Image (spheres, rainbow, N blue to C red):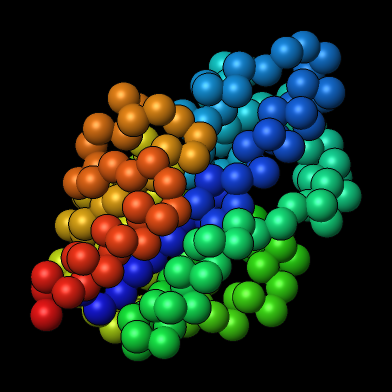
Amino acid sequence: MNAVIFDFDGVLTTQTLDIAVKELGKILGKPIDKERIALLEGTPIEGIISEYIGKPIDDPEVIEIDRKKLEMFRKDRKTIKLQEKPIELVKKLNKKGIKLAIASGSRKENLNEILGKTKNMFKIILTSEDFNKNKPDPEPYLTAAKKLGVTPSECIVIENAPRGIESAKAAGMTCIAITTTLKATHLKKADIIVNDYDQLEKTIFELIEAKK
């Protein structure tokens, strides 16, 4: 294995789901089903809103909710911190010469602010603006592999949601799912499921060594 591609929300940070639920609750004026939102992760936020309220993505209500949500998140994202353990893992992988990328359904402006200088650790960072088709389509992960200069079979994908897992598997990649936001029962299509970042690190390095 020569490359590791990370999803962002729920993998490098675990706060964004709680913030999304809080913000949508304020906008819609009612409690939000957190698990249902988690199951839709990987889709750009406008797509999540569309599916959640049951209206087309170009419906004026969806567009207005998306606008309000973005305004809120521009303030809330300043409080989001990257998880320490996956960033330490990224540093170790860098030292080992493994090519690293992020493939996320989030907006570029959000990732850039949250990542800060950490973005320099990744060779490629792709967001929803970079794809014609988002997860669960394989395009995000295939695009990442192409830009990294590796074949899909050389890639390990780290995911936390069913749509991302489906995208990675359709791209022909090995997928490790971590139970940061959903129970293992929702992640069954992944090749491997881990429960914490220590187990994630151990599994990644085992796969890298096994493919030498």
Q: Which residue is at the far top? A: 30
Q: Quadrant of the C terminus?
A: bottom left
The quarter holding residue 188 reads: top left
Tell me the residue at 49%/40% (across/down).
180
Q: Whole-percent x and y of residue 210?
A: 12, 70
Quarter of the image where one finds residue 50: top right
Q: In the drawing, does residue 55 fall left or right of residue 205?
A: right
Q: Position of residue 117 (x, y in %)?
A: 69, 79
Establish if 179 lies above or below 158.
Answer: above
Q: Position of residue 32 (x, y in %)?
A: 67, 17
Between residue 109 and residue 7, name the one nearer to us: 7
Residue 84 visible from this viewpoint: yes
**Does residue 109 appear to the left or right of 168 in the view shown?**
right
Residue name at image x 20 percent, y 46 percent? 191
Of residues 173 and 188, the one nearer the viewer is 188
In the shown orientation, is residue 43 left or right of residue 159? right
Whether residue 131 is visible: no
What residue sits 71% from the left and 73% below the top? 116
* Viewport quadrant of the N terminus: bottom left
Total numbered labels placed on residues in the image: 0
Q: Horizontal and vertical percent for residue 114?
A: 71, 62
